[in-house]
Image: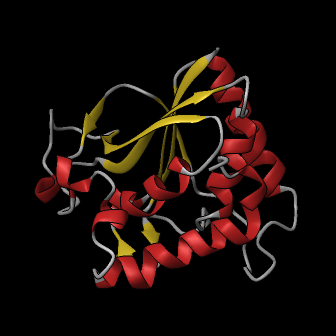
């Protein structure tokens, strides 16, 4: 079994944590912070936008079951990588689209995926098709506070979960149901 790790950010981590936990081949998903300036930042610090950290998830996946390319297809399919420092109503650098690669192979796969999507009619409803996803070498991951774990599942009555997270999950299910783990 070949376990690899990638760190991705595409807005609020509550949305993408729940989605990637459902994907076959994904072993673990952890919410946290990365690509910023402070050591071990708190959620309260990160959401101010002053730490330069992004809300991210760290994914451990079995590359014999699911490829990084497929994970990136999901990643780009569930958020808008053409909006700088914004996903829906969430705005600020902490919500930026970011891929934190661990080695040159991950960097190449990520660059190829971005080029592929940039050269396709990826976002037909957009005037501009410029993908602004930051591609950066992974340096450090800081786990989010434990109350963020399984946030969507543990807070189904939360308005943000009902209005934002649920919509992203439905988009994922509509486009990627063939990649769901078997029950």
Q: Is residue 8 placed above or below 170 in the rendered structure?
A: above
Image quadrant where residue 176 sits: bottom right
Left or right for 94, reference 120: left
Where residue 86 appears, as percent x and y from the top left, is 44, 70
Count of numbered labels shown in the rendering: 0
Q: Could one spot residue 89 in this view of the protein?
A: no
- Between 16 and 114, the one lying in front of the other is 16
Q: Is residue 86 placed above or below 29 in the rendered structure?
A: below
Q: Could one spot residue 15 in this view of the protein?
A: yes
Image quadrant where residue 28 sits: top left
Snapshot colouring: secondary structure
**Residue at image coords 73%, 32%:** 67
Image quadrant where residue 65 sits: top right
**Residue at image coords 25%, 35%:** 142
Left or right for 164, reference 93: right
Where residue 95 appears, as percent x and y from the top left, is 38, 61
Where residue 41 appears, as percent x and y from the top left, is 15, 43
In the picture, the quarter occupied by the N terminus is top right
**Residue at image coords 37%, 25%:** 139
**Residue at image coords 37%, 74%:** 90
Left or right for 125, reference 24: right
Where residue 10 appears, as percent x and y from the top left, is 49, 57
Q: Which residue lies furthest to the front in this view?
A: 183
Q: Which residue lies furthest to the top in this view?
A: 1
- Between 15 and 91, the one lying in front of the other is 15
Left or right for 147, reference 13: left
């Amino acid at each position: 079994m070949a376990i690899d790790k990638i760190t991705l950010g595409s807005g609020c981590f509550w949305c993408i944590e729940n989605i990637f936990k459902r994907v076959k081949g994904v072993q673990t998903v952890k919410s946290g912070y990365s690509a910023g300036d402070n050591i071990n930042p708190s959620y309260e610090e990160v959401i101010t936008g002053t730490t330069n950290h992004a809300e991210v998830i760290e994914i451990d996946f079995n590359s014999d079951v699911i490829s990084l390319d497929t994970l990136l297809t999901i990643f780009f399919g569930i958020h808008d990588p053409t909006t700088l420092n914004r996903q829906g109503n969430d705005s600020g650098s902490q919500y930026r689209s970011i891929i934190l690669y661990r080695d040159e192979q991950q960097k190449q796969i990520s660059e190829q995926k971005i080029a592929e999507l940039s050269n396709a009619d990826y976002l037909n409803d957009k005037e501009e098709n410029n993908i602004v996803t930051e591609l950066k070498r992974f340096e450090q991951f800081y786990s989010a506070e434990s109350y963020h774990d399984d946030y969507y599942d543990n807070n189904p009555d939360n308005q943000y979960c009902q209005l934002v997270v649920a919509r992203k999950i439905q988009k994922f299910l509509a486009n990627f149901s063939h990649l769901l783990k078997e029950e």
